[in-house]
Amino acid sequence: MSPLLSILVALGLGAQQCLGSASLSDRVIQCLTTADVPQALPGTSEFDKSRSPHNLREQFTPLAVALPTTVSHVQAAVACGRKNGVKVNPRSGGHNYGSHGIGGEDGHLVVDLRFMNDVKVDNCTHIATVGPGAKLGNLALALDAQGKRSIPHGLCPKVGVGGHVLHGGWGYSTHNHGLFLDYLEEVQLVTANSSVVTASATKNPQLFWALRGAGMSFGIATRFKFRTLPQPEEIQLFYIPFIWNLTQAQAGWRAFQDYAASKARPKEMNFRVVISSGSFLGAEGTIFLFEGAYHGSRADYDRVIKPFRDAAIALGGYADMLQYPEVTAVNYMDSLLYANNNALLFGPAGAEPLESGFYKSMLTDKLSGPTVDALMTAVSNAGQTNPSRFWLWIVSAIGGPNSALTTMFPASSTSYSHRSSLLLWELGDTVGTTETYPSDVGIPWTNQFVDLVEKKEGKTLGMYYNYADPSIGDHGKAGRRYWPGNYDRLVALKRAWDGEGVFENPQTVGRR
Ligand SMILES: Cc1cc2nc3c(=O)[nH]c(=O)nc-3n(C[C@H](O)[C@H](O)[C@H](O)COP(=O)(O)OP(=O)(O)OC[C@H]3O[C@@H](n4cnc5c(N)ncnc54)[C@H](O)[C@@H]3O)c2cc1C
C-alpha cells in the first residue's frame, strides 16, 4: 500500500470512533470504511479541501467525502451512496460556478477524484490515457513532456479534466480544432449499479454520445482516452484594446461580429472580446479588449486581422493600457501560460484567485441592429447601474463559417448542443473574496442583459453547462437551455442508465 493510500485509509478507519448516533452521514462513512475506500472525514483539512468551491458564493456541506485512488474504490463509493439513498457526486477540479462538483446543495456523497490524475501518452498511437482528476495545467505539461503533443482545451490550468471535457471545453485552439470533448475516443465509467463500462464509438455509442456534453448525469468517469495533436509551431498572442463611448461601442460591436462571422476569418484565428467598465481603469466609457491566439506566422496574422483591426482603429478610442507589444510570437506551451495569466497584458501574475459572484452564459449568433444598439446602451450605462461590483464579460467567437465546431464535427456527433452558435458569452459579476456577494441585486442585474437579448431577438437562448447558472432552475428547465434539441434524448438515456437518480445535482438531466 502506498504511503498516501495508508494515510487516507487510516483517515477513513478513524471514522469508527465518530459513530454512535448512526446518522445518515455516519452510515455512509461506515459503509466507506468497511469497503476500505479512502475518505476525508468531516472536521479535517482534507474534507475542507474537497468541499472548497472555486466560487465562494456557492458553499455546501457534503455528508461524506470519498477520496478514491482506484476504480474499485469508486465502485464501492457509488454502492455506499446508493445503498443509503444518498446522491453521489463526482468532483474533479471543483471549478463549476454552481459548485456542482460538491453537489450544488448540502448532503451529497462527494467522490473527489483528485488522486486519479495520471496522464500517459502512447508512443505509437499518441493516444493519451488521462485520469479525471488531472488539472488542465498538468495535462498540458505531461503531453508536452511525452512527445510534444496537445489537445484543444480551456485556458485555466487548475480546471479539472473531468468536468471540463464532459460538458465542452473551449480554448485557444477551438476555432481551428474543436472542443476538448471532440478529442475523446473512449470513456471508462462507473455506473449507478457500480458496474464499470466502456463508452466509445463502438461500445455503448448512445452513452458515449450523452457523455460528450452532459456527462455528469450518467456516472463517474474514471478514465479518458484522447486523440492528441502535434503542438502548433508558432502562435501569435494578441491584445487590441479600446475604451469606447456608446457610439463607438455600437459601431465596434458590429465590426466585431461581422468579422467573427465572415469567411475572411480563417480557422486559425481564435478570437474573443473582454468587456468591462472603463471606470476600473479610471476612465470614462467601456473597455473592449479584443484578444486571441492566431495559429501561424506574424505576417499571416497581420494580413488576416487587418479587416477587423482597421475598422476598429477607425472608430478611435485605442487605449494605452498594454505593458507589452500588441502582438507576441510564442510557442504552444507559452501561449497557454500567457493567455491564462495575461502576463503579456499586465505583467507577471500571481496564483489563480478564487472568486465570489454570479456567472451566466448565453449562446448567440450575430445580433440584429436593434439588439446591438440596446445592448450597447445598457453596457455603456453599466458603470452607473453597477458602480460597486466588478463585472467582466468574455465573448468568444468560437463559431462561424470556418470553425472546426461545424466544419469538422457533425451537429449530431455529441450531446453538446451549441455547435452552430457564433458567440459564447460568459457574463461574470463578482465582489472581493472577503465580501458577501449581494445575490438579490447582482443576479437580477446580470440576468437583465440576457433577458434584453432574448426579448429583442425573440428567442430563448442556449446556455453552456460549463458556466453553470443555478438561477435558470432545476433539471428540465435548465436542461432545455444547456442541451436544446437534445434534452429529450438525454432524458431517455438518463432513465436507462440511472433510473434511480443516483447521480444528481440540481441541474443534471432529469428522469422525466
Ligand atoms: C477560472 C476558470 C476558468 C475557466 N476557463 C474555462 C475555459 O477556458 N474554457 C471552458 O470551456 N470552460 C472554462 N471554465 C469552466 C470549466 O470548464 C467548468 O467549470 C468545468 O465544469 C470545471 O470542471 P472541474 O472538473 O474543474 O469542475 P467540478 O466542479 O469538479 O465538476 C464540474 C461538473 O462535472 C461533474 N464531474 C466532474 N468530474 C466528473 C467525472 N469524472 N465524471 C462525471 N462527472 C464529473 C461534476 O459533478 C460537476 O457537475 C473555467 C472555469 C473557471 C472557474
Image: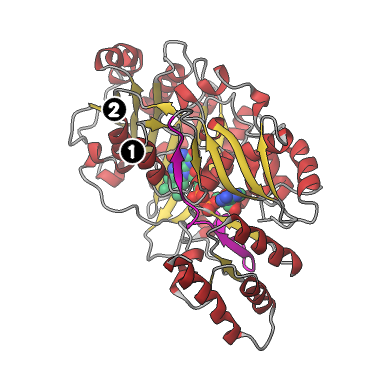
Q: Position of residue 90 (x, y in %)?
A: 59, 56
**In the image, residue 99 lies in the stretch drawn in magenta:** yes
- Location of residue 80 by image quarter: bottom right
Type of secondary structure dominating the magenta stretch = loop
Which residue lies at the image location 48% right of the left edge and 34% below the top edge? Answer: 170
Residue 2: say if magenta: no
To which residue does mark 1 refer?
Answer: 145
Q: Position of residue 379 (x, y in %)?
A: 43, 38
User: Mark 2 Cα within 10 Å, few/some/many (few <14, many 20+)?
Assistant: many
What amino acid type is highlighted by mark number 2? Phe
| Whether residue 39 can be seen here | yes
Quadrant of the rendered image containing residue 392: top left
Mark 1 packing: few (<14 Cα in 10 Å), some, or many (20+)?
few
Q: Give the quarter of the image for residue 254.
A: top left
Element type at mark 1: helix
Residue 128 in the image: state x and y as whole percent.
48, 36
Q: Is residue 116 above or below residue 459?
A: below
Query: Is 444 located above or below residue 153 in the figure?
Result: below
Residue in the picture at 45% in, 28% down? 124
Task: Write down the region rendered in magenta.
Answer: 97-123
**Disc 2: which residue:** 238
Is residue 8 left or right of 172 when viewed as pictured? Answer: right
Confirm or reject: label 2 Cβ below 8 Å from ligand 1.
no
Q: Amino acid at mark 1?
A: Ala
Residue 131 in percent (x, y) is at 51, 48
